[in-house]
Image (cartoon, grey):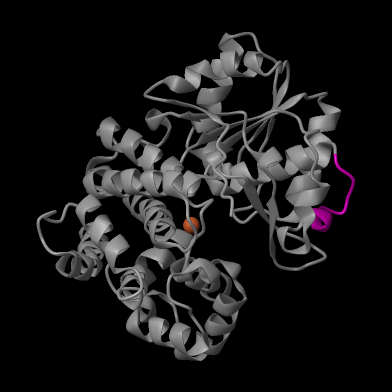
């Protein structure tokens, strides 16, 4: 049986590294990029900062900002049109997960025939994606999704009427720039919620079924970073650049690790966003303790490793360490202000059947260490209530 590890993206990190953007574009032979952002990135002044970096290098570029907070098909086609009419030859994705996902889909559709649903992962779309895409440089402005190093793009399509995942190694950015100065202005709630998404990627991939030692090493490193630096990033993210940088690294590490697979927390989070409109990272934070407890017997050794990465005494027995993980995650969640259960955050009793249905539909629980059926999802929702 063979296994695969694949990770070809250049990753630059450190305060001020966004100033390397012109050099990175030159590296990939780009002369006129389309810079894909959303209104939040423009409003925070980050689009302006990056535009100044490009202007000071004498670079020509076009900014495209019509990206919804959950990207839709229209955003992609308008982006393709902007790319063509400005004569662009590369794409820069700048923002949280939404602009980065939109940037990948725009890159794909500049050189691939429609419809976008042809590239749907669940319909074997990967086989239709060729290497013929403009080069992409990704610059994250949140630390959570890790979209800058992921090979997926999630778009709400007109024909499928659901969030559709486009997947291909050809969607990977040629370079990712992790600059903590761009995340300094994130408010505490977004810092906390996106940080818990990064933690969920690292924890769920470490315990996921499948043999992937490279991903495991990334996941342990990412987990340790979240444990040490998320509280600091939430408390004083404006000034604590070290915490911001470490959280960006934890986020990228989690997204590299998740090529191994995720688990039941992500299936529930997907459902909570679709049915109750909850922030993806916040949803993960609220269900993680119950999901970790659910997996205790099937993943005891793995959870024991994670407890140490989370700061627990390495000399304790595996049983003690595995049991401690739930409290360590719960404690972190409370410390960063994500207290309360699902019922205190807009989830209502009558939503439960739809939540269970959506969670079952989501493929990611298939790599959860303990098989998870409808009754299990119902119980996990109750325990997170
Ligand atoms: Fe996630």
Answer whether residue 143 is visible to the viewer in this image. no
Name above or below for residue 47 compared with residue 284: above
Asked if residue 34 lies left or right of residue 319, the reply is: right
Q: Residue at x 81, y 42 (%)?
A: 109
**Which quarter shows the C terminus?**
bottom left
Q: Residue at x 37, y 73 (%)?
A: 291
Using the image as rendered, state which of residue 297 and residue 152 is in the foreground: 297
Q: Position of residue 38 (x, y in %)?
A: 60, 43
Q: Quadrant of residue 237 in the image?
A: top left
Q: Residue at x 45, y 41 (%)?
A: 252
Q: Residue at x 44, y 80 (%)?
A: 347
Name above or below for residue 211 compared with residue 171: below
Asked if residue 368 lies left or right of residue 354, the reply is: left
Q: Position of residue 162 (x, y in %)?
A: 70, 67
Q: Position of residue 319 (x, y in %)?
A: 18, 70
Q: In the image, which residues are magenta?
A: 112-119
Name above or below for residue 97 compared with residue 210: above
Answer whether residue 371 is visible to the viewer in this image. yes
Using the image as rendered, state which of residue 163 and residue 369 is in the foreground: 369
> How many numbered marks, from 0 up?
0
């Amino acid at each position: 049986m063979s296994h695969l590890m694949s990770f070809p993206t250049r990753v630059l990190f450190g305060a001020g590294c966004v100033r390397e953007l012109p050099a990175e574009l030159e590296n990939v032979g780009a002369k006129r990029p389309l810079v894909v952002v959303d209104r939040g990135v423009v409003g925070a002044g980050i689009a302006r900062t990056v535009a100044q970096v490009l202007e000071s290098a004498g670079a020509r570029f076009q900014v495209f900002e019509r990206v919804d907070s959950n990207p839709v098909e229209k955003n992609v086609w308008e982006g393709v049109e902007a790319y063509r009419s400005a004569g662009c030859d590369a794409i820069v994705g700048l923002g949280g997960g939404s602009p980065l996902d939109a940037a990948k889909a725009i890159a794909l559709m500049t050189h691939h025939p429609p419809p976008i649903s042809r590239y749907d992962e669940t319909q074997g779309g990967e086989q239709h994606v060729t290497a013929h895409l403009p080069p992409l440089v990704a610059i994250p402005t949140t630390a959570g999704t890790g979209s800058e190093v992921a090979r997926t793009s999630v778009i709400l399509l007109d024909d499928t009427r659901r969030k559709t995942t486009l997947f291909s190694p050809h969607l990977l950015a040629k370079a990712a720039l992790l600059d903590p100065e761009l995340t300094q202005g994130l408010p505490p709630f977004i810092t906390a919620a996106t940080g818990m998404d990064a933690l969920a990627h690292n924890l769920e991939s470490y315990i996921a079924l499948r043999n992937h030692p490279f991903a495991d090493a990334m996941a342990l490193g990412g987990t340790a970073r979240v444990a040490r630096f998320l509280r600091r990033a939430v408390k004083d993210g404006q000034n604590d650049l070290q915490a911001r940088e470490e959280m960006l690294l934890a986020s990228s590490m989690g997204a590299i690790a998740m090529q191994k697979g995720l688990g039941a927390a992500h299936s529930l989070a997907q459902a909570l966003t679709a049915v109750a409109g909850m922030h993806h990272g916040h949803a993960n934070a609220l269900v993680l303790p119950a999901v970790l407890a659910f997996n205790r017997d099937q993943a005891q050794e793995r959870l024991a490793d994670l407890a140490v990465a989370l700061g627990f005494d390495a000399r304790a027995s595996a049983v003690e360490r595995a049991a401690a993980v739930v409290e360590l995650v719960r404690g972190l969640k409370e410390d960063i202000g994500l207290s309360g259960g699902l019922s205190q955050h807009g989830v209502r009793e009558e939503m439960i059947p739809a939540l269970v249905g959506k969670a079952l539909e989501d493929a990611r629980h298939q790599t959860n260490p303990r098989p998870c059926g409808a009754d299990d999802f119902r119980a996990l929702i109750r325990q997170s209530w």
